[in-house]
């Protein structure tokens, strides 16, 4: 089992997010590098990603990539996670990293490790 089958989320699940990217490539690059504030700041400065002060509601539309292993200590992650395309409450399409520590669906987290 790999890819979406190894995640705890599925298309249609409702989530909230505070950080997102406008394109899948930027969010995937961030996830592949284990996150990190420095990379996120550069992507925000380039206008590729953004951070919001409050939560934004969204619906997962499609799994893009992952799962990726937990952060190696440079960021705030504590569980494997995947990149998803979402449709948010404002009608925008964005790309987010969602931890696989929740969700309605069972998953084999060891696949992400």
Image (cartoon, rainbow, N blue to C red):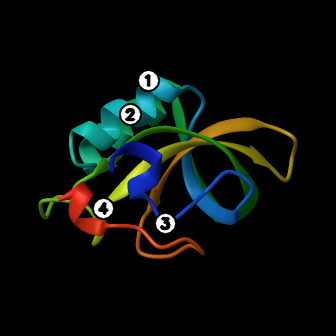
Say which residue label 4 marks.
80
> In the figure, is residue 69 to the left or right of 103?
left
SS of the residue under disc 4: loop
SS of the residue under disc 1: helix
> In the figure, is residue 58 to the left or right of 107?
right
Along the line of sight, the residue nearer the viewer: 23 or 51: 23
**Circle nearer the viewer, 4 or 3:** 3
Q: How many other residues sit within 10 Å of disc 2, few (<14), some (14-19) or many (≥20)?
A: many
Instruction: Find residue 16 and report its horizontal and vertical position in percent.
Output: 66, 65
**Circle nearer the viewer, 1 or 3:** 3
Residue at the image point whose x is 43% and y is 28% from the top:
26
Say which residue label 3 marks.
8
Q: Which mark is residue 28?
A: 2
Q: How many other residues sit within 10 Å of disc 3, few (<14), some (14-19) or many (≥20)?
A: many
User: In the rendered structure, which disc, 1 or 3, sits on the residue that comes first in sequence?
Assistant: 3
Q: How many other residues sit within 10 Å of disc 1, few (<14), some (14-19) or many (≥20)?
A: some
Q: CA distance from mark 4 to mark 1?
A: 19 Å
Residue at the image point whose x is 85% and y is 53% from the top:
89
User: In the rendered structure, which disc, 3 or 2, sits on the residue that comes first in sequence?
Assistant: 3
- Seen as rendered, the residue at the extreme left is 72
Q: Are marks 2 and 4 in contact (CB under 8 Å)?
A: no
User: In the rendered structure, which disc, 4 or 1, sits on the residue that comes first in sequence?
Assistant: 1
Say which residue label 1 marks.
25
SS of the residue under disc 3: loop
Along the line of sight, the residue nearer the viewer: 110 or 16: 110
Q: How many other residues sit within 10 Å of disc 4, few (<14), some (14-19) or many (≥20)?
A: many
Q: Is residue 42 visible?
A: yes
């Amino acid at each position: 089992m790999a890819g979406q089958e190894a995640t705890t989320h599925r298309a249609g699940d409702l989530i909230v997010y505070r950080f997102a990217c406008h394109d899948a490539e930027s969010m995937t690059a961030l996830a592949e590098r284990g996150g990190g504030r420095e990379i996120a700041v550069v992507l925000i400065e380039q206008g590729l990603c953004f951070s919001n002060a409050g939560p934004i509601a969204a619906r997962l539309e499609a799994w893009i990539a992952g799962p990726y292993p937990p952060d190696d200590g440079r960021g705030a992650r504590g569980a494997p996670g995947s990149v998803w395309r979402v449709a948010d409450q404002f009608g925008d399409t964005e790309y987010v990293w969602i931890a696989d520590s929740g969700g309605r669906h069972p998953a084999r987290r060891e696949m992400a490790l």
